[in-house]
Amino acid sequence: MQLYYASASPFARKALVTLHETGQLDDVEIVAATGTPLDASQMPTAHNPLGKLPALSRPDGPAIYDSRVICRYLDARAKAGLYPDRSQWETLTLEATADGIMDAAVLMVYEGRCRPENLQSADWVNGQWDKISRALDAITTRWMSHLAGPMDMGHIAIACALGYLDFRHDDRAWRKGRDALDDWFATFSQRDSMQATRP
Ligand SMILES: N[C@@H](CCC(=O)N[C@@H](CS)C(=O)NCC(=O)O)C(=O)O
């Protein structure tokens, strides 16, 4: 298999952390790719027509994409149990929350990087941050007991989302007033899979 990957992509990191955690690293070649909505020339568009990372090519079927699909596939392939039956909908909702944080955080970066300065909107960027902020508050009020339980895909996704906030939006100080989430992230970040995939 080949994983199309960029170390700065939190979505690609989700896939790579999942490979680490499920013991499948040796089954995959990591292929570096890069791009933005303005330039897909170095993106694996033959494998993902959307021109986004990650994408995974497989010997036993067509390439698959979207980190949620790839992580679910890798979990099923290794029978790793990262989407436990007893909490399937919670796990998927937590993963969706993390992906939404990443989407908003990536759009904030693209606004500054891909749009001409005179067309950039501070209100729009702040609106993206408001989504992130509400999601972080929801995690601290609703999801800490889930995060305290056995690791599932929700844990991996949230950790990759928080890692991206540190990487790209450190100035927004997401930890302020969210001590429990900060503590959880500090502990989760010690895992080999997280250390090996730091952006
Ligand atoms: N929903 C997708 C989002 C993937 C995504 O947005 N990846 C970014 C990198 S962080 C990308 O490839 N951006 C290029 C673009 O939007 O053209 C997933 O979960 O894989």
Image (cartoon, grey):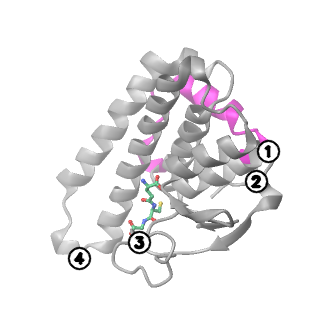
The image quarter containing residue 57 is: bottom right
- The foreground one among 98 and 179 is 98
Q: Is residue 37 visible?
A: yes
Q: Position of residue 39 (x, y in %)?
A: 39, 81
Image mark for residue 49: 3
Q: Is mark 2 within 8 Å of ligand 1?
A: no
Give the amino acid type for the residue marked by disc 1 in the picture.
Asp
Q: Which of pointers 1 and 3 indicates the residue nearer the eye? A: 3
Q: Which residues are magenta?
A: 170-194
Give the amino acid type for the residue marked by disc 2 in the picture.
Ala
Residue hosting label 4 = 116
Residue furthest to the bottom in view is 41
Give the amino acid type for the residue marked by disc 4 in the picture.
Pro
| Earlier sequence position, callout 4 versus callout 2 | 4
The answer to whether the residues at label 4 and label 2 have Cβ atoms under 8 Å apart is no
Q: Is residue 140 above or below residue 198?
A: above
* Mark 2 neighbour density, 10 Å: few (under 14) some (14–19) many (20 or more): few
176 in the magenta segment = yes
Please indicate whether residue 27 sits to the left or right of residue 110 in the image: right
Residue hosting label 2 = 196
Please indicate whether residue 23 sits to the left or right of residue 62 in the image: right
* Mark 4 neighbour density, 10 Å: few (under 14) some (14–19) many (20 or more): few
Alpha carbon distance from label 1 to label 3: 32 Å
Report helix, strand or loop for mark 3: loop
Q: Is residue 54 visible?
A: no
Give the amino acid type for the residue marked by disc 3 in the picture.
Pro
